[in-house]
Amino acid sequence: MAEGMLRRDPLNKIWVIFTPEKVKTLISGSSENEAKFDVDPFVPGVESATGPDILRHNDPLYAVGGWSSRVFPAKNPILRVENDKNGKGYGLYDSMSRLGAHEVVVETPKSGIGLDQLSVEEIADGIKIIFDRIADLRKDTRFRYISVIKSRGAAAGGTINHNYSEIKAYPFIPPFVRNKLDNCLEYYRMKERCLICDIIDQELSDRKRIVEEHDNFVAICPYASRFPFEMTVLPKKHGRILSDNPVSAINDFAKILRSVAVKLKNGLNSPAYNMVFNYLPVNSGGDAEAESLAYHWHLEIIPRISVITADSLENGIFVNPTLPEDAAEFLRNIRE
């Protein structure tokens, strides 16, 4: 079997991670079907199935078997922290080793339940352990971007019926993130203001696309939503990452996440979904001060209730049957 690596596409300016060891699993399809797992490997008592923890929280109010949340290396990582970069050129093409990190965050000992069934305090504990790991990974100067994604349900790429997330540290800045950062920098240089701060001000003024509003956060259906019932959770206070906001904001963030999860379950019949955290890249090589002032972290929530079309995959063109104003009004009226 050929060795995995990272290769750069010079036409689309993207890096592709090749993982040949996953081919058999992909063909069998078992890793994409939650029902195939007879035993949840993320519950207390079977920690040996996942290997030793990198970090563990033990909140006595929610702990079972000695932990309330835990982080461990992915069993089949797409990136490996022990690798060297080994960047190479081959004519037009560039490649490197699969340098990075790939970790799993199990945010609760409880099996088979979603965010809507957890308390605010339990969700906050999961958030805290994620950001403890981000703070540590950001210290590694080999990394350029720390990604946190929650995939819930088989249609969204979830593999275990458990509330968990994945953290990946990349040795490059993903192109979508780079595009956002460049757009934010362009706006800042032109107006000396943060683009996302201005979006928040506009949405709070219009109030047509607000789904939920708390003291420190607001959830909206974006003005140009790509997907039906897509939402973005935005901190009202400018920051590169959650740790830039007050400590008290973590509980408020947990509250709005739980509220949004209830709306997804009760309003959209418990769809599969992805949550994608968007943070300022690290070690970008650019103007760190300008990037910090220009970029504003946020969370994207994408219910997987429609297929991704060829236009979206190849051309970056999205067709959404639901106007964000209608989607926001519908979700706003969904209660627990």
Image (cartoon, rainbow, N blue to C red):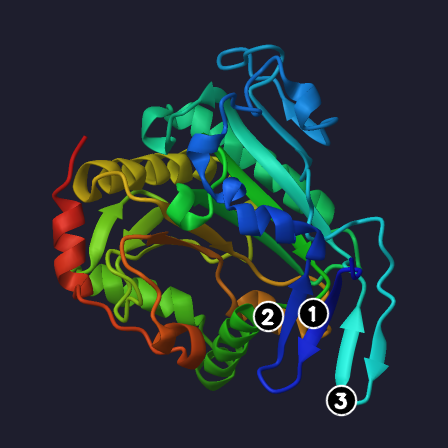
SS type, badge 3: loop
Whether residue 286 is visible to the viewer of this picture, yes or no, is no
The residue pinned by badge 2 equals: 291
Check disc 1 and give the amino acid type: Ser
Front residue (pair 298, 85): 85
- Image disc number at residue 92: 3
* Residue 278: percent from left, percent from top: 50, 58
Task: Assign the C terminus to one quadrant of the image.
Answer: top left
In the rendering, at what x and y percent does residue 284 appear?
A: 69, 69
- Is 196 or 87 nearer to us in this picture? 87
Is 181 left or right of 100, judged from the image as shown? left
* Labels 1 & 2 near each other (Cβ < 8 A): yes
- Residue 278 falls left or right of residue 234: right
Residue underneath mark 1? 284
In the structure shown, which secondary structural element does the residue marked by tag 1 occupy? loop
Choose the circle earlier in sequence order: 1 or 3: 3
Q: Secondary structure at mark 2?
A: helix
User: Which residue sits at x=17%, y=59%?
Assistant: 207
Of the residues shown, which amino acid type is indicated by label 2? Glu
